[in-house]
């Protein structure tokens, strides 16, 4: 039971870090243009680099949480409770990945296009 609670807790922390990292990328002014990453009109040279660095750290914490979920859910899978933890681990990894990747797509592709449209 404590293993399942631990998995859920690590997932919540990981998702919060992933969503915060995606939001930080958007707030920093980093956008995806046709030929790579670019700067939005609200990019601040002195501040935005720090924001991107913070976003990278938060996304690395999110990736570490995915690895932790995978490792913890795989250990002891021979028991009945272990099989539940393994199935829960797969579901939690899918949920965390889906939410964070959707937030990254929103932050790097969708919202910058909306900001550009507002300038017309």
Image: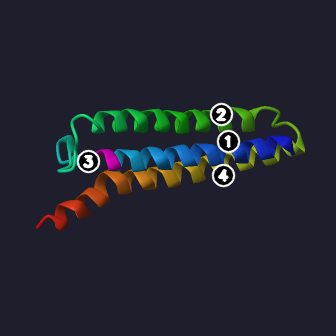
Residue labelled with disc 4: 91
Please tell me which of labels 4 and 3 falls first in the chain.
Answer: 3
Residue 102: mark in rendering = none
User: In the image, 4: left or right of 116?
Assistant: right
Q: Nearer the viewer, residue 40 or 98?
A: 40
Residue labelled with disc 3: 31
User: In the image, 8: left or right of 105?
Assistant: right
Please tell me whether residue 28 belongs to the stretch shown in magenta: yes
Please tell me which of labels 2 and 3 falls first in the chain.
Answer: 3
Q: Quadrant of the C terminus?
A: bottom left
Q: Secondary structure at mark 1?
A: helix
Q: Quadrant of the N terminus?
A: top right
Residue labelled with disc 1: 10
Please tell me which of labels 2 and 4 falls first in the chain.
Answer: 2
Residue labelled with disc 2: 68
Outermost residue, front direction?
A: 46
Residue 31: give x, y in percent of width and height.
26, 47
Please tell me whether residue 98 belongs to the stretch shown in magenta: no
Magenta residues?
27-31
Distance in Å between CA atoms under marks 1 and 4: 13 Å
Q: Secondary structure at mark 4?
A: helix
Could you tell me if the residues under marks 2 and 3 are in contact, i.e. CB atoms within 8 Å? no
Could you tell me if the residues under marks 2 and 1 are in contact, i.e. CB atoms within 8 Å? yes
To which quarter of the image does residue 37 belong? top left
């Amino acid at each position: 039971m404590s293993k399942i609670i631990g998995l859920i807790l690590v997932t919540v922390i990981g998702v919060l870090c992933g969503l915060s990292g995606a939001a930080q990328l958007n707030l920093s002014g980093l956008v995806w243009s046709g030929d790579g990453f670019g700067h939005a009109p609200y990019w601040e040279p002195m501040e935005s680099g720090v924001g991107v660095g913070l976003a990278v750290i938060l996304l690395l914490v999110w990736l570490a949480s995915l690895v932790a979920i995978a490792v913890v859910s795989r250990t002891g899978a021979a028991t009945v409770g272990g099989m539940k933890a393994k199935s829960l681990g797969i579901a939690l990894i899918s949920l965390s990945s889906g939410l964070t990747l959707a937030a990254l797509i929103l932050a790097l592709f969708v919202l910058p296009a909306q900001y550009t449209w507002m300038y017309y």
